[in-house]
Image (cartoon, rainbow, N blue to C red):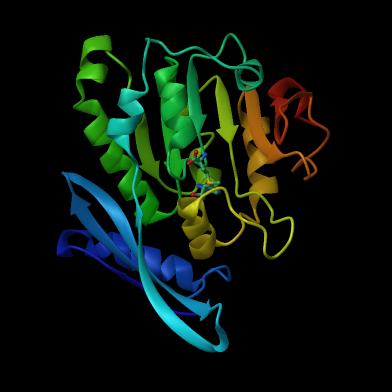
Amino acid sequence: MEVVIKGPDEYADIIAQQIQLCANRSGCEQTSIELIQRNGQLELLEQVTINSVKQSDRAAQQAVSQQLRHNIDVAQFVKQQKSWPAAKHKPLSQAIGRKTRKLIDATAGWGGDAMRFCAQGYEVICLERQPLFALVLSDAMRVLAETEWVQKNSVSVPIVECGEAMQLLGRSEFDADCIYLDPMFPSKRKSSAMANKSMELLHRLIGEDIDADSLVRHSAENYPRTVVKRPNYAPPLWRKPDEQFGGKLIRYDVYFQSRSKD
Ligand SMILES: C[S@@+](CC[C@H](N)C(=O)[O-])C[C@H]1O[C@@H](n2cnc3c(N)ncnc32)[C@H](O)[C@@H]1O
């Protein structure tokens, strides 16, 4: 296993923390990443080497080097916003609940869900324990805050906090009506395809979120409502959910604090 991460000197501390974290996690495979700034926003450039086999000559393997770009496309997100606030879609909105105003996305990752919540008018706090991803997400939120869409509609842009949710949730500064959790889905098979290349990178760097069950329990005991996104093929992460709202491939398990205490 080798993880090489490089980037501008001003981010050396964050890069060092990320490398340390990867070294302590068994999920990390050989990875080479560069943190760069492009069009005024931070993104990750991943170097991958693929063994390609020519159809005509299966014996001749060729190592092909490829670069993958991982970024949070703020411009595209803003372009997609046709009305403010955006419509809420079932079954997620049912899981989040009608009374929810303030929400913590405690497994924020690339911020896809957090940005959708923000577009729907929720006040959002993002927690992310991977320093590099928290940095890229926080930078994307800075760019989002400067857009005309945010300023015209006085949108509340998500706040990003880098840290371990188990330690942050429950503190008075992190009060919320609802906690949203989307830990890494377990692989169906070893070879199962990830949703996209950026999720694949997350998975390669951090492996599975093996402590997700403790996080669900901790959250459900400390907040009025906890929503957990799960693939339909996987069982709930904790006890039997108090409510479930399902889609074709995924479902949302809901836990109420009132029923989560002994
Ligand atoms: C599947 S990704 C989330 C994807 C996200 N919902 C999106 O739309 O981009 C899961 C993320 O949760 C983070 N995570 C998992 N457990 C965490 C914890 N206990 N504290 C903070 N972050 C956590 C992981 O580092 C990873 O980035």
Question: Residue placed at 52% from the left, 42% from the top?
Answer: 107
Q: Is residue 173 visible?
A: no
- Identify the residue at image location x=46%, y=23%: 117
Exactly how many numbered labels are in the figure?
A: 0
Q: Quadrant of the C terminus?
A: top right
Residue 98 image-quadrant placement = top right
In percent of width and height, residue 216 lies at 66, 39
Q: Is residue 14 above or below residue 137?
A: below
Left or right of 53, for residue 192: right
Which corner quadrant of the image does residue 88 belong to? Answer: top right
| 53 in relation to 248, above or below | below
Where is residue 174 shown, x and y percent of the image? 46, 30
Is residue 196 shown to the viewer in this render? Answer: yes
- The percent coordinates of residue 201 (x first, y second) are 47, 59
In the image, 183 versus 217, the foreground residue is 183
The one nearer the camera, 4 or 216, is 4
Answer with left or right where residue 148 lies relative to residue 61: left
Q: Residue at x 50, y 86 (%)?
A: 61
On the image, the x and y values in percent for residue 247 come to: 71, 27
Please identify the residue farthest to the right as the structure is shown. 240
Is 231 located above or below residue 208 in the figure?
above
